[in-house]
Image (cartoon, rainbow, N blue to C red):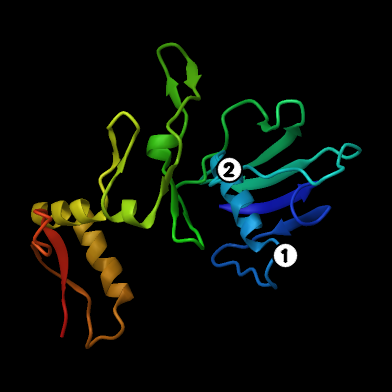
Amino acid sequence: MLARLRLQGVGPSEELGPVELGEGVNLLTGDNGLGKSFLLDVAWWALTGAWPARPAWPRPGVASREPLIEAEVRGKTATAAVSAHYELAEERWVLAKGRPPMPGLVLYFRVDGRFSLWDPAQHYWRRNRARNVDHAERPEPLQLLPDELWNAVTSSDGRTLCRGLIEDWVTWQQTRSPEHDALCRVLDCLSPSEAEKLVPGPPMRVWLDDVRLHPTLNLP
């Protein structure tokens, strides 16, 4: 989890923080344009090493004060510091060398309907134990539009990066997999009441021009 965040020379204010974040839910409030979404973008970057959209730019006229982003990330076994400075000549943020901390699965639900996903099983560094080296070149986190979340995400060369919830849901249900059991527990938690339980129904074709089986829900 992200435990602490501090900004200098970047964002809507000259300096922000340190912002101390607690376990569980943290609530950010304020008027429009104060930087709430910007702070969430920086939090995502601190946890994943990737920007959800355009990278943050330093404030105008910061040549006298180096732009910095500092964070504290708490993993399963240890807490690690993340620090980056902005390289003006190359126009990019430079992280300290070495293996970054691993916070676990990171989901970012964005105000424009997009979703960002960083999965350590896919996007974290891997170690080649035979050669005792780290491979830092990992696939970028997934940035999904709402339609891609349901259908699929493909790369420019045609590879499927994420199958989409429609196909996954049906596959989980037909194979009675542990993922389907987890999905049923999530639906149970989201049910409005004991009398109105959300229960998966049989997969079926919904549209004439779409031959896929689609998930359904049994309703009272």
Across and down, in percent, residue 112 comes to: 49, 61
Q: Secondary structure at mark 1?
A: loop
The vertical placement of 124 against 78, above or below, is: above
Across and down, in percent, residue 96 comes to: 67, 29
The vertical placement of 179 against 188, above or below, is: above
Q: Real-space Cα distance between discs 2 and 1?
A: 33 Å
Judged from this view, the residue extending furthest toward the right is 64
Please report the residue visible at 16 percent of the width from the left and 81 percent of the height from the top.
219
In this view of the protein, which residue sits in the foreground, 128 or 55? 55
Q: Secondary structure at mark 2?
A: loop
- Under mark 1, the amino acid is Leu
Q: Is residue 58 left or right of residue 39?
A: right
- Say which residue label 1 marks: 34
Please report the residue visible at 43 percent of the width from the left and 36 percent of the height from the top.
123
Residue 78 is tagged as 2
Please report the residue visible at 28 percent of the width from the left and 56 percent of the height from the top.
150
In this view of the protein, which residue sits in the foreground, 196 or 159? 159
In this view of the protein, which residue sits in the foreground, 127 or 209? 209
Please report the residue visible at 87 percent of the width from the left and 43 percent of the height from the top.
61
Residues at badges 2 and 1 in contact (C-beta under 8 Å)? no
The part of the image, by quadrant, that contains residue 46 is top right
Question: Would residue 178 be visible to someone looking at this image?
Answer: no
Q: Earlier in the sequence, mark 2 or mark 1?
A: 1
